Amino acid sequence: MAKALYSTIQGLTDTSIKTQDGKLLVLPTAAGGVLNPGIKDQEITAMSRIGEMVIVDTYPVERKPEIKLDWNQKNVQLLSMRLGLQFSTQTAVAAKYVNSGLLVTKGSYAGSAVGFEGNGVAADQAGTVAYSLGTDQIAVALTRQPFATFAPATVLSYAQGADGGMLFSTDLIGQYVAFEVPQTLASVTALSDQATGSYAMTLMTIMQDRSILQWDFPSVAVKKAQGDINLSEPKMEITFYIQYDGSTCLPYQITYKGQAQKRTCKS
């Protein structure tokens, strides 16, 4: 049990974010959070008895807080918040099946099974392109043959089959190739042009004795110009403006729930 004098926040245990229409997002708890109160003070100065200007009083004239949350995950809902646009279920969406540097080790590559990338692609798709890395390190365009009548002796050629299957001419074995196959997906989750809007946010931080500090932010909006989206790692960082919506005197509220509302584990 922590001594009362040294009781301290142990960690952030819950991140609750709600949309303007009351939808509660199902998100993992943020791995970390930093609140910048954004307070600007007005200084009142006067001349001291020894002829120096000194501060005799201060008072706040501006309160523009921000909160930055860090997640160890990057998923569709977090990307939606960060980009400020909603994802939605869309049908007949144009997509691509690509490979950016395949080392050809055989003349024939089978199509993909159900549930895997490339499945559903029709053979001989218009717009399919393929290139090989030439001996001078310059990409060379490959000639596309019909899949059903493919002749492997035709140099620098390929064919594109059903479900993303590929055929390559004999001279390409041992060479690196890149290809791009258009495909149409029947139903996917895709970024739309519908704005996400503002959110309401509640954070729970737990003390050493399992008592809880509740942080309420009635209105927050993503600071879209803040932070990059790193595509090579799962971490996600989002900074929010804490907006004043008139529901409280301050833009946010902190409530210590005390010993009567201590955290318990529930199965």
Image: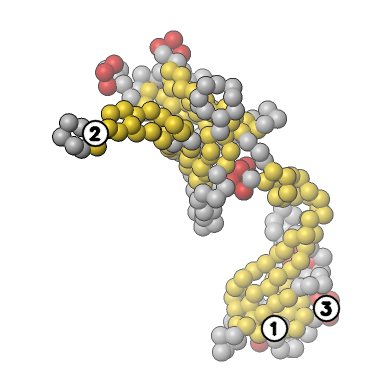
Residue at 33% x, 25% y is 8
Above/below status of 263 relative to 198: above
| Residue 96 location (% of width, % of height) | 72, 63
- State the SS at label 1: strand
SS type, badge 2: strand
Q: Is residue 193 left or right of residue 80?
A: right
Instruction: From the top left corner, tell me how far across and down residue 193 is, in percent.
Output: 73, 49
Instruction: Name which residue lies at 80% across and 81% down.
Output: 145
Residues 82 and 90: in front is: 82
Look at the picture and state if 192 lies above or below 179.
Answer: above
Give the quadrant of the N terminus. Answer: top left
- The mark found on residue 141 in the picture is 1
For image coordinates 78% across by 48% down, the residue present is 90
Discs 1, 2 touching: Cβ within 8 Å = no
Position in image of residue 151 (x %, y %): 78, 85
Q: Amino acid at mark 3?
A: Pro
Task: Judge depth for marks 1 and 2 and give the one in front.
Answer: 2
Image position, residue 17 (x, y; %): 58, 32
**Which comes before the other along the chain, label 2 or label 3?**
2
- Name the residue: 38% across, 28% down: 59
Q: Which residue is mark 3?
A: 146
Image check: 139 left or right of 235?
right
Amino acid residing under circle 1:
Ala
